[in-house]
Image (spheres, rainbow, N blue to C red):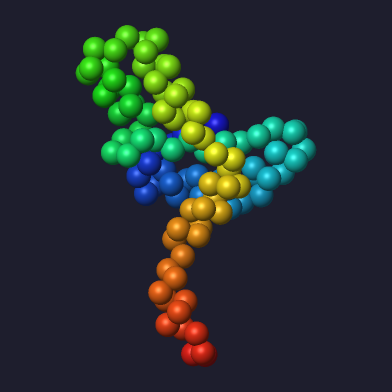
Amino acid sequence: MLCLDSDDAGIAAVERLCGGSFLMNAARSHSVQFLVASLPSGMKDPGDFIEMRRSKNKDNREIAEGFRKDVISRATDWSDWYLANVLDSYDKNAAREAVGKL
């Protein structure tokens, strides 16, 4: 499970892992599944999740259950996450404007 910071540096780190051959080779040779967990909107890192819940007087068990429910259960396969991320960064308007221009 990969759950890095949701800032540009954290996303870039996950992209590097997914874009290289390490995850694919490890998944194939060791029959493991790698998942990418995204944090809820407005949270920079897993510590923000914990602090927000702690500030609402939740105990550690409630915080852990919330993390499982709101983050871990929504994790996606690394290859699906990577493809969606690449497609989201693709500028469709730039492609339309470039049609026929070489």
Give x and y (percent) for residue 49.
33, 27
**Quick check: 42 left or right of 79?**
left
14 or 100: which is nearer to us? 100
Percent across and percent down for residue 14 are 50, 45
Q: Indicate left or right for 38 with 25 as reference.
A: left
Residue at (49% x, 33% y) in the render: 74
Residue 86, percent from left and from top: 51, 58
Quadrant that contains the N terminus: top right
- The relative height of residue 27 versus residue 49 in the rendered view (above or below) is below
The image shows residue 26, relative to residue 49, as above or below, that is below
Side of 101 where 22 appears, left or right: right
Q: Residue at x 50, y 85 (%)?
A: 99
In the rendered view, does 13 fall on the left or right side of 8? right
User: From where the camera sits, is residue 50 visible?
Assistant: yes
Q: Residue at x 44, y 71 (%)?
A: 92
- Whether residue 44 is visible here, answered yes or no, is no
